[in-house]
Image: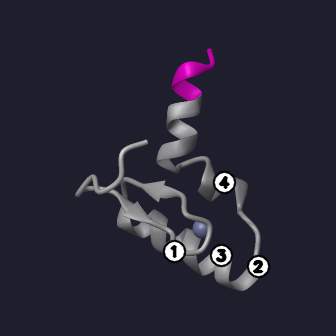
Amino acid sequence: MEEGKGSMYKCGICGLHYNEEKDAEECFKWCSAHDSCNLSIASRSVEALEKRKSTS
Ligand SMILES: [Zn+2]
């Protein structure tokens, strides 16, 4: 995974990356409140999308 792709937004708590700033914000809010990942948010992360690509 390359760092510093300008168009990605990172959740500072769990470290997942998002293409949409609002998704990263949602994730950050969830992570800070619940101290765990919300699967429906995490499934929109770049990491989850990459994983889905390689698994058919
Ligand atoms: Zn997060």
Q: Give the spatial CA distance, label 2 vs label 3.
A: 6 Å
Q: Are marks 2 and 1 in contact (CB under 8 Å)?
A: no
- At mark 3, the secondary structure is helix
> In the image, what residue type sits under mark 4?
Ser
Q: Position of residue 55 (x, y in %)?
A: 62, 19
Q: Position of residue 38 (x, y in %)?
A: 71, 62
Q: Give the spatial CA distance, label 4 vs label 2.
A: 14 Å
Sequence-wise first label, 4 or 2: 2
Sequence-wise first label, 4 or 3: 3
Q: Are marks 3 and 1 in contact (CB under 8 Å)?
A: no
- At mark 4, the secondary structure is helix
Camera-side residue of 4 and 18: 4
Sequence-wise first label, 1 or 4: 1
Q: Are marks 1 and 4 in contact (CB under 8 Å)?
A: no
Residue picked out by circle 1 = 12
Q: Quadrant location of the N terminus?
A: top left
Q: Which contiguous range is marked in magenta?
A: 52-56
Any mark on residue 40, and which? Answer: 4
